[in-house]
Image (spheres, rainbow, N blue to C red):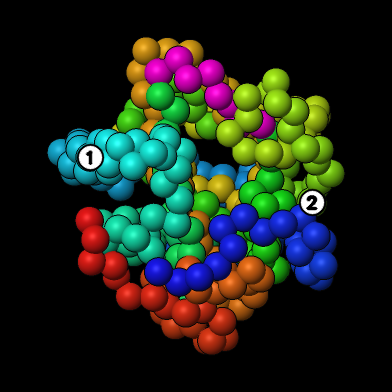
Amino acid sequence: MPKFNAVPDQSELEQMDRDLRFYPSQVTDPDTLTPSQIEQYNRDGYLRNLLVFPARAANEIRLYFDGLLNRTIAAGGDSYSISSAHLMYGPVYDLLREPRIVAFVKDILGKDVIGWGSHFFCKMPFDGKSVAWHQDASYWPLTPSKAATVWLAIDDADIENGCMRFVAGSQHVGHLTYRPSSDDEGNVLNQTIDNAEQYGEVVYDELKAGEISLHSDLLLHGSEANNSDRRRCGLTLRYCTPDVVAGSNWHEKGVVVSGVDYSGNWANPSRPNAS
């Protein structure tokens, strides 16, 4: 497995001269999305309810994740532990490269696309953990901020079981100041942006299993706790344009999923054998 720092320290991020501005999609002739959907992404910073996998295929993915989660817990991990999974598990690598997913991403980022991240966010029933308002770009040693996240619903995600929520249009306000999360917040991550609702309308990202949403790395988003008796799992798949430069050796994670790496920045690791 490639060697990289899974979590860059704050000093390293501060030392990077990062360009943290929103770059709207420049695609004018999309293949899968409509021009109005691209306009919406540029305005609101997200798209949602894009169907990728019909019910039978979505159930197969869920069954695969059930087995992976059981193995992870048996090895001492938890439901949030499965990160950079495409570097370890062939089926997740395949999802990162799934043509039906990449087709949506290409219509936002352009024909040349790098897939560099994969992380299961799985809220077990009544687990009490939330994800505070944050911007993905704050966590990532990447520049410029030409990155987007696909959130693939493994389970149905709704308000009751803690679906993701967005602050529409907040990517336009730029990179925001955050504070370290306090222990009593129960935050899955470690950053909190206070009073996020002042930057736009809050939209709940309710998805059926097999659907995806897609959001900008500067969009404010988070999720409330799962207080239901149902699990809520999603697989985040992270993409960027090839000209993005990575610190902390994160270039080792990047797979060419469409077109070419014209910059030569990314390692393009091969598919792992493990399932």
Q: Is mark 2 on a helix, strand or loop?
A: loop
As for residue 10 lying within the magenta part, the answer is no
- Residue denoted by label 2: 175
The residue lying toward the viewer, choosing from 57 and 132, is 132
- Residue denoted by label 1: 67
Residue 244 locus on image (x, y percent): 62, 73
Residue 196 locus on image (x, y percent): 76, 31
Magenta stretch secondary structure, dominant: loop
Using a 10 Å C-alpha cutoff, classify the residue at mark 1 as few (fewer than 14 neighbours), some (14 to 19) or many (20 or more): few
Q: Can residue 186 be seen in this view?
A: yes
Q: What element carries label 1?
A: helix
| Magenta region | 125-132
Q: Can residue 160 be seen in this view?
A: no
Q: Residue at x 47, y 79 (%)?
A: 267
Q: Quadrant of the N terminus?
A: bottom left
Q: Distance between the residues labelled 1 and 2?
A: 38 Å
Q: Which amino acid does label 1 sit on?
A: Gly
